[in-house]
Amino acid sequence: MNTTYNYERDTLKHTFTGHTKVFQNFSQAYQDLFVLTMLNGKKNGKYVEVGANHPQSLSNTFLLETVFGWRGFSVEIERSMCEVFNGDMARQNHCYEADATKFDYSEAIAKEKWQGRVDYFSVDCEPPEVTFNALKAFPHDEFRASVITFEHDSYKDGDTIRDHSRKFLEDLGYQLVCACVCNGGNSYEDWWVDPTVVKESVWKPFACVRSEARNIFV
């Protein structure tokens, strides 16, 4: 399955401001394009990335940082991956070596001098139980996210974490837009927005269930 977008080759169903600057995206399944579409190519946004892994390959935040000037931080439990991330000269934003279920997000956000909102919250750990615990560890009473992508891996781990995470986010007032996004036929992720920030006219055309990620955009 082709999961890479190229401006010279592909045509987006719904364009966003600055889309012509995107000659390649880097997320595994277009999460970076979803964020940019929902926020109309926002520049200088703010992100929190849980489960960073590699700084460029399959990264949900590399495009946001390097092309659109976003600030943020990542959390990764594997020391070797943190060292690779923080040693990548293309990345200026920091990756913390930490357990995402116990990490002090409030302290890290305070260092960034943010207040009230982050633009993108990416939650992708292994296994799904850890991802859900990391989601719950975020200080939702202090900060809201405009866009959230949550990996539940229901195709291999069942629907329990998927269902728990949905109730959790729905109770917080978030809107599920793309349910069970697929990559190569595997249903593994949900994509959300804060409907107080992202208008229905923006997210509604993307509403889907069990769609291949690429087919959502091109």
Image (cartoon, rainbow, N blue to C red):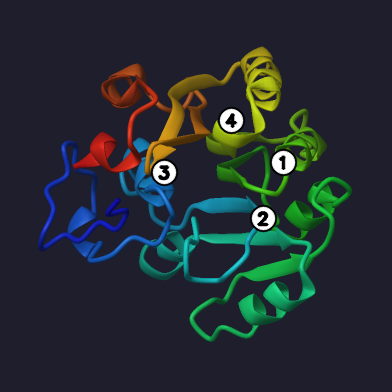
| Amino acid on which disc 1 is placed | Thr
| Crowdedness near tag 1: few (<14), some (14–19) or many (≥20) residues, C-alpha within 10 Å | many
User: In which quarter of the view is residue 138 placed?
Assistant: top right
Query: What x and y, as percent, mark residue 58?
Result: 47, 61
Q: Which mark is residue 51?
A: 2
Q: Which mark is residue 22?
A: none
| Crowdedness near tag 2: few (<14), some (14–19) or many (≥20) residues, C-alpha within 10 Å | many
Q: Secondary structure at mark 1?
A: helix
Q: Secondary structure at mark 4?
A: helix
**Residue at screen point 64% across, 26% down:** 158
Q: Spatial distance from mark 3 to mark 1, Cα to Cα? A: 19 Å
Tell me which label, 1 or 2, sits earlier in the chain.
2
Q: Spatial distance from mark 2 to mark 4, Cα to Cα? A: 18 Å
Q: Which mark is residue 131?
A: 1
| Amino acid on which disc 4 is placed | Ser
| Dot in front, 4 or 3 | 4
| Dot in front, 4 or 1 | 4
